Image (cartoon, rainbow, N blue to C red):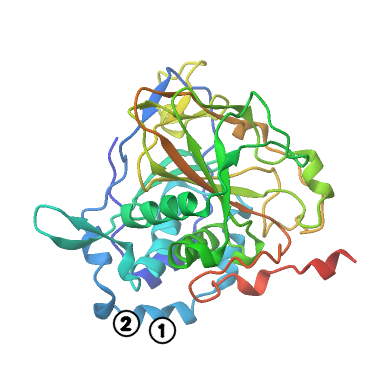
């Protein structure tokens, strides 16, 4: 079912988000499906994403936004409408004043604004696919920086960083100075969506999957992570940088599909497969605990949400799958990750000194 995003000014849109607390419970669902197209497209999105010189007032508006709203948004279950408006409101704040968030139209040789489209695979627990999250130019820049680093090595798992047959890709970690602008745009967007500052994020992990390579079922947070100074991985934002000829989907076997929940013919064996698409992002929380909830503390031990267990299926045929992961923690990592201008959630940073 296709829906249009609410066509409202950003200030009204943000007030609507804060006031909306409806809950869509999840339920069993039907057959396996491959997700590779947007379900929600705004007919007016091109007017929302005008070039930066036409929206200078957007920068001033950002200074007056209630950062508490961003920090606490995910503390309670949200409706589909509220999630849609939250994501588009967050991306508007970045895209409207960043020229590199445009893609190039080969036919007319003109630059067109990104038009993000959001698929809500599950409202609770949140699992979203955001198309046009990053431009193809930025995706290419990140891949080039990874290749230029010369540090691509066999991927590892766990705090012991062991190689395993369960994960056969290669990995490199990029710091801010290696690809500063794309990485800062990415950190800014993830900061707004998650409600936590860029300083709480790990350096960008970039992974290459060649034919036959995969990552078996796993959760991004593990109990041993609670023993680290930065605590566990609260949330994940995975971005597809390059797509293979076939395969390479991200598989969530235990997530209850929001669309199937709404269908009366739901069956118990449906699976969610997200197909790699350049510039698309997958956002989800790895833990049961979320920032802003009255029982949440940055110092608490975190418990993995097993519903968000997932796998990277084997790449098939020609081409490579490239992805990057931006992982978010409850504690400042002091890793040098920066946003464009600090991020609206900067005041919610928890320093490592709080652990003492």
- Percent across and percent down for residue 94 are 40, 68
**Disc 2 designates what residue?**
56
Which residue is depicted at the point 84% across and 68% down? 354
Which residue is depicted at the point 83% across and 70% down? 353
Label number found at residue 60 = 1
In the image, 38 versus 51, the foreground residue is: 51
**Is 297 left or right of 177, judged from the image as shown?**
right
Identity of the residue furthest to the right in this view: 356
Q: Quadrant of the N terminus?
A: top left
Residue 191 sits in quarter: bottom right
- Give the SS element for disc 2: loop
How many numbered marks appear? 2
Above or below, 32 relative to 179: above
Which residue is depicted at the point 43% across and 56% down? 87
Q: Quadrant of the C terminus?
A: bottom right
In the image, 40 versus 130, the foreground residue is: 130
- Percent across and percent down for residue 303 are 75, 41
**Is 164 left or right of 106, judged from the image as shown?**
right
**Is 129 left or right of 116, judged from the image as shown?**
right
- Asked whether the viewer can see residue 267, the reply is yes
**Is 64 left or right of 350, judged from the image as shown?**
left
- Percent across and percent down for residue 230 are 76, 57
Instruction: Kindly report the distance in space between the C-alpha atoms of the residues bearing marks 1 and 2.
Output: 7 Å
Above or below, 87 relative to 38: below
Disc 1 + disc 2, Cβ < 8 Å: yes
Residue 286 sits in quarter: top right
Q: Residues within 10 Å of mark 1 (few under 14, many from 20)?
A: few
In the image, 235 versus 156, the foreground residue is: 156
- Asked whether the viewer can see residue 197, the reply is no
Q: Residues within 10 Å of mark 2 (few under 14, many from 20)?
A: few
């Amino acid at each position: 079912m296709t829906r249009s995003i609410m066509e409202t000014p950003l200030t009204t849109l943000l007030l609507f988000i804060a006031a909306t607390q409806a809950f869509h419970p999840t339920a069993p669902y039907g057959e396996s499906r491959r997700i590779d197209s947007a379900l929600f497209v705004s007919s007016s999105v091109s007017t929302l994403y005008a070039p930066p010189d036409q929206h200078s007032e957007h920068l001033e508006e950002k200074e007056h936004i209630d950062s508490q709203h961003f920090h606490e948004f995910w503390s309670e279950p949200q409706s589909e409408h509220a999630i849609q408006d939250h994501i588009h409101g967050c991306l508007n704040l970045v895209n409207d004043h960043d020229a590199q968030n445009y893609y190039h139209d080969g036919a007319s040789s003109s630059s067109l604004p990104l038009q993000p489209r959001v698929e809500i695979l599950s409202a609770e627990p949140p699992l979203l696919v955001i198309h046009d999250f990053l431009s193809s130019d930025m995706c290419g820049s990140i891949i080039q920086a990874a290749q230029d680093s010369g540090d691509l090595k066999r991927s590892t798992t766990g705090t012991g960083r062991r190689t395993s047959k369960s994960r056969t890709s290669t990995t490199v970690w990029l710091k801010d100075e290696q690809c500063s602008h794309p990485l800062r745009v990415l950190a800014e967007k993830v900061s707004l969506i998650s409600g936590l500052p860029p300083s709480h994020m790990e350096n960008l992990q970039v992974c290459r999957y060649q034919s036959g390579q995969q990552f078996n079922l796993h959760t991004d947070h593990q109990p041993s992570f609670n023993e680290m100074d930065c605590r566990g991985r609260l949330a994940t934002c995975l971005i597809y940088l390059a797509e293979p000829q076939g395969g390479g989907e991200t598989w969530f076997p235990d997530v209850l599909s929001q669309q199937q929940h709404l269908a009366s013919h739901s069956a118990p064996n449906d699976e969610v497969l997200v197909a790699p698409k350049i510039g698309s992002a997958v956002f989800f929380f790895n833990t049961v605990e979320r920032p802003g909830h009255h029982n949440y503390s940055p110092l608490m031990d975190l418990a993995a949400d097993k519903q968000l267990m997932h796998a990277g299926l084997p790449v098939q045929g020609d081409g490579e799958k490239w992805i990057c992961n931006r992982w978010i923690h409850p504690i400042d990592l002091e890793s040098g990750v920066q946003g464009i201008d600090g991020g609206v959630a900067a005041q919610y940073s928890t320093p490592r000194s709080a652990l003492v």
